[in-house]
Image (cartoon, helix red, strand yellow):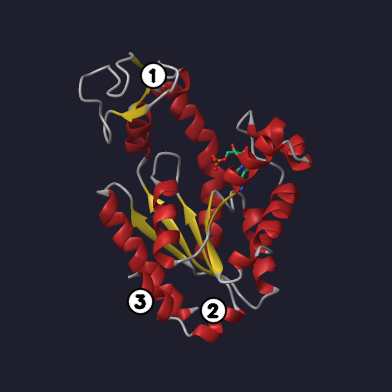
Amino acid sequence: MTQATRLDRPSETVAERPLVFVTLGAPGAGKGTQALRLAKELGLPHISTGDLFRASLRDGSALGDEVRKYVEKGILVPDLLTMRVVEERFAQPDAIAGAVLDGFPRTRPQAEALDVLLARQDAHVAAALYIEVDTPELVQRLAGRRVCSGTQQHVYNLATRPPRAAGVCDLDGSALEQRPDDRPATISARLARQLPPMYEVVDHYTETGVLHAVRGDRPMDEVTADLLRVADRAAKRA
Ligand code: AMP
């Protein structure tokens, strides 16, 4: 699939125009995992704005100082600042061929700014891949997270990665705990805050004609296969 996908696109087009995929999905939809898989299969860099912001906090860079107050509270970084970071990342040599975007765009203005950025290179978003999972299922998935109380904080999920013995970490035998913000009431509040901007981005890509929805409430490999099929078709059209 990897080679086929890369070769299906005429090489001169790859050199001229970046092939950009946006991944969309609520927390718990499996977007991060799928975006990484897609990037690997398509031979494109995986660009996560969350990762870029967290790296800037670790580096102690000037950007880190600017974004700390937002990232640490889980509030969206202002659009202009986010766009600066994205533009800088797009200017790196590995992004010449394109990218699989994860966690960006998060707002309609960011989606519009990305269109403008790509239009400068005579390009556009090849496909916005929306991994759809119903809200009750999301709450159930997120509420299933259990974290080991030992120093290493190993992470489990009652639905997708249960421990061998209930309530006990497989790796160091510590008790497993549920974080306060993973309780269903807190999760519902978090989703209520985060979903409306995502739906605006979904609407934007519906309007621009590049939205492709894939059901995310299925085994992970099936979801990946569907996303790759959509991406492959979009790559041929781009
Ligand atoms: P994530 O890992 O995608 O959940 O992002 C972690 C944090 O980084 C978010 O809670 C925001 O503070 C910030 N962030 C990541 N991506 C964006 C974005 N596209 N726009 C604004 N803030 C973002």
Which one is earlier in the sequence, the residue at label 2 or at label 3?
Answer: 3
**In the image, is residue 192 above or below residue 207?**
above
Label 2 neighbourhood size at 10 Å, few (<14), some (14-19), many (20+)? Answer: some
Residue extending farthest to the right is 62
Which one is earlier in the sequence, the residue at label 1 or at label 3?
Answer: 3
- Find disc 1 in the rendering and name its residue: 178
C-alpha separation, residue under disc 2 versus residue under disc 1: 46 Å
Label 1 neighbourhood size at 10 Å, few (<14), some (14-19), many (20+)? Answer: some
- Find disc 3 in the rendering and name its residue: 4
Mark seen at residue 140: none
- Find disc 2 in the rendering and name its residue: 14
Find residue 229 and report its horizontal and vertical position in percent. 33, 68
Q: How many marks?
A: 3
Disc 1 secondary structure class? loop
Q: Quadrant of residue 54?
A: top right
Which residue type does callout 1 highlight?
Answer: Gln
Label 3 neighbourhood size at 10 Å, few (<14), some (14-19), many (20+)? Answer: few
Disc 3 secondary structure class? helix
Relative to 214, 56 lies left or right = right
Tags 2 and 1 touching, CB below 8 Å: no
Find residue 57 and report its horizontal and vertical position in percent. 67, 36
Q: Nearer the viewer, residue 196 or 226?
A: 226
**In the image, is residue 120 above or below residue 201?**
below
What residue is at 56 percent from the left and 68 percent from the top?
Answer: 98
Residue extending farthest to the front is 172
Q: Looking at the rendering, in which quadrant would you find the N terminus? A: bottom left
